[in-house]
Image (cartoon, grey):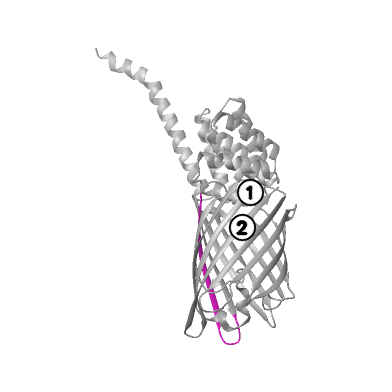
Amino acid sequence: MKRYPAFLLLLLLPITMSAQQNSTADELYLRARTAAFEQKDYVVSIALAKEALEKAPDYTDISIFLGRLYTWNKDVVSARTVFEDLGKKGVKDEDYFVAYASLEYWNDENTNAIKVIDEGLSNHPSSEALWLLKAKVYFGINDYSEAEKAIASLLLINPKNTEARALAVRINEFSTKNAIGIIYNYSHFDKQFDDDWHVIGVSYKRITSLGSIILRGNYANKFAQNGTQIELEAYPRLSKIFYLYVGGGYSDDVGLFPKYRTGVSLNANLPHSFEAEIGYRQLYFTNSIWMYTASVGKYYKNFWFNLRTYITPDNKNISHSYTGTVRYYTKSAQDYFAFQIGTGISPEENRNNLLENENFKLKTFKIGAEYNFSVQANSFSLGTMYYNQEYLPNEKGNQFDITLGYTRKF
């Protein structure tokens, strides 16, 4: 009977040693992750991961992590070797395909990245990470049609994916080569002016390899007078993160429109689905009015939040304008409800001729809503805005705007 404990010990010894071995590999894996994420020491992390794999060669998670470490440490050859070895072993983990495709994407090996992604999607058709990466790859090589298909597939799986929603809006700007649009704005004043205002704008947008270009003609009936304006705007891309807004306009009908207008902004698509803009706008009637603008935006699930300010200095004081906007996207980047609230007058509004005089320094409150929806290549918009305008010191009036828009892409 005394021999049984020894016999049982011999039986349990391999199991115990195996558990210790796996436990040790797990501990090394944990230390490797700590070195990588907390200390940013990839050399130490790689050494720990390799030591862990010596103890547990078939530990797939550690092998994938080692491939990521080589990627982050810019050792492309070693990273690719790790991932190719995993492929030969028949590994089908979602994280393997994401890590391998990310290596190829970050090193501009886009053909291989798509190949890996497609294999991954055949095994994991509902993978949000793979669909998102596929959209990024195609967007990066200017294949906007395929990028739009990929991001649409992802949003069908999860309409509240924040990063996908932000990318969908960017892709939408380039998804077709041409677009024509028409917009009509109607304004009614209860006190400030006797006549209603009517403004119609017709535009043509063309996507080029450098970015989009927009040519627009505007017709206005204000103060019972007619006038026209021509505008040209461009959005050249500087990199994957930065792009510019450059715009200008001219009109012979000063008073209804500024004689000249110019504007330049630097825009950035930032990490964590943030975006930002800083720049200036200039209007010239009989004198130049300079405005400096800045905005910050954030995508969160189906929502887009934006806060914009205009600051207008002169010899006496500095005027401020603030506008907050919230959008709720229902389907694509062209389908959303929007709510807006703010103070002050914006040069982007059809009321910019009011900036010619001192009125822009008086108090203005505005609140409004907008609905945009699309039907195939057609998009429609309906908006309304209410203004409470101090048009003279201690004298306020109300303004009601209705805006209708239509765009056709082709």
Q: Specify whether residue 378 is in view.
A: yes
Residue 181, x across and y down, in percent? 67, 56
Q: Circle 1 sits in a helix, a strand or a loop, which is it?
A: strand
Q: How many marks?
A: 2
The answer to whether the residues at label 2 and label 1 have Cβ atoms under 8 Å apart is no
The vertical placement of 296 against 79, above or below, is: below
Residue 30, x across and y down, in percent? 46, 40
**Main SS of residues in magenta:** strand
Q: Bounds of the magenta span?
A: 313-329
Residue corresponding to mark 2 = 405
Q: Residue furthest top?
A: 1
Q: Residue at x 57, y 69 (%)?
A: 187
**Left or right: where 338 falls relative to 218:** left
Q: Residue at x 52, y 63 (%)?
A: 384
The vertical placement of 16 against 293, above or below, is: above
Q: Residues within 10 Å of mark 1 (few under 14, many from 20)?
A: some
